[in-house]
Amino acid sequence: MRNSIFAIRALIKSLKRMNVREKTLTYFFLFLILGLSINTLFWLAPQEMSNEDLFRIEEGDSLSQISKNLEKKKLVESGSWFRLFVMMMGGERKIKAGDYYIEKPLPVFTLAYRTVVGKFSLTPLKITVPEGLNTKQVAELLKPRLKFLNEEEFVRIADEGRLFPDTYFFLPNAGAREVIRTMEGNFDKKMEEIKDKISESGENLNEILIMASIIEEEALNQEDRKIVSGILWKRLEIEMPLQVDATFSYVNGKNTYELTHDDLRIESPYNSYRNVGLPPTPISNPGLDAILAALEPTETNYFYFLADRRGNTYYAETFEEHQTNREKYLRR
């Protein structure tokens, strides 16, 4: 501080010794430097913020608290200038509570203006949820785009199998309950469209969804899905274990080519090699084609099937033929 005072005094003494022309040039450059400094520090948009962010102003937040939160999220370089501009525009009482979508770095004046007029800029985000993801995977897909979505809450309250795969438009501030309500609402509409098929099948909706979630993982095209469906329903009828590898992905995350003999012996209601019948819940969220395949199985003489790494499916009527297919298509 003392050094600054000495520097100012020295500058004043120097100005006294200058002629008018020299003083004019000196004042010009001083104001230029001051203006550029203010512009750099307070007016330009921040350089460190992410490409997009959400900023929430709660009801009752003070101007001081809001400015500190903006600084913390690196949405402004100086909370002091934000407060000054808000005061110039009417003060704290003018600020509109809500969620603001900051799609790019903004000058502090612009940000202050948006909070005063309530310009939230919440443009819906287009997000596609593919078939066959389980609820945890759906949450992991959504979280990077929906900043307020709580993954643990999402997994806890969502019903596996009823998060219908589709393309959605969610607001950036959508939370877990809102997303689940939208996706399960879409599921209900789709099921309403095929309610007659469901009724005629003789199976309840939960059993159909469990079967469809397995079919979704075990076959790639609709013809194979229907054949696999016929095989699995037939196994259930004769109380033969389903013996599908897809259920293990729900238990330990392993696929067919990663499973060991020890995995096939693990104690789990989802171990379809040890247990007879369907697993207790769907293992993923199946699409409409897999659900229709569960409802419209193709009857064949096959009891066994397997798929190679390219997704080609091979069928067999006997276990010996199945073993031959394993040696031929899975060992290479």
Image: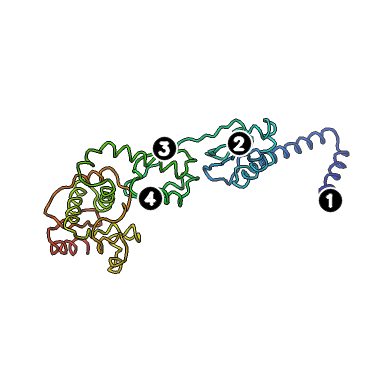
Q: What residue is disc 1 on?
A: 2
138 and 194: which one is in front?
194
* Image point (86%, 41%), residue name: 12
Q: Label 1 crowding class (10 Å Cα cut-off): few <14, some 14-19, many 20+?
A: few
Apparent side of residue 211 relative to residue 27 in the rendered image (left or right) = left
User: If you read the primary sequence from the N terminus, does the residue marked by circle 2 or circle 1 appear first?
Assistant: 1
Q: x, y percentage for residue 114?
A: 59, 33
Task: Identify residue type, mark 4.
Answer: Thr
Disc number lying in front (2 or 4): 4
Q: Position of residue 198 (x, y in %)?
A: 23, 42
| Local secondary structure at mark 1 | helix
Residue pointed to by mark 4: 135
Dot in front, 4 or 1: 4
Circle 2: residue type: Leu
Instruction: Tell me the distance, in whole angstroms, between the alpha carbons under discs 3 and 1.
Output: 59 Å
Colouring method of the image: rainbow
For residue 169, the mark is 3
- Horizontal placement of 265 versus 44: left or right? left
The relative height of residue 156 versus residue 17 in the rendered view (above or below) is below
Q: Which image quarter: residue 117?
A: top right
Residue 80 coordinates in the image, percent (x, y):
69, 41
Q: Quadrant of the C terminus?
A: bottom left
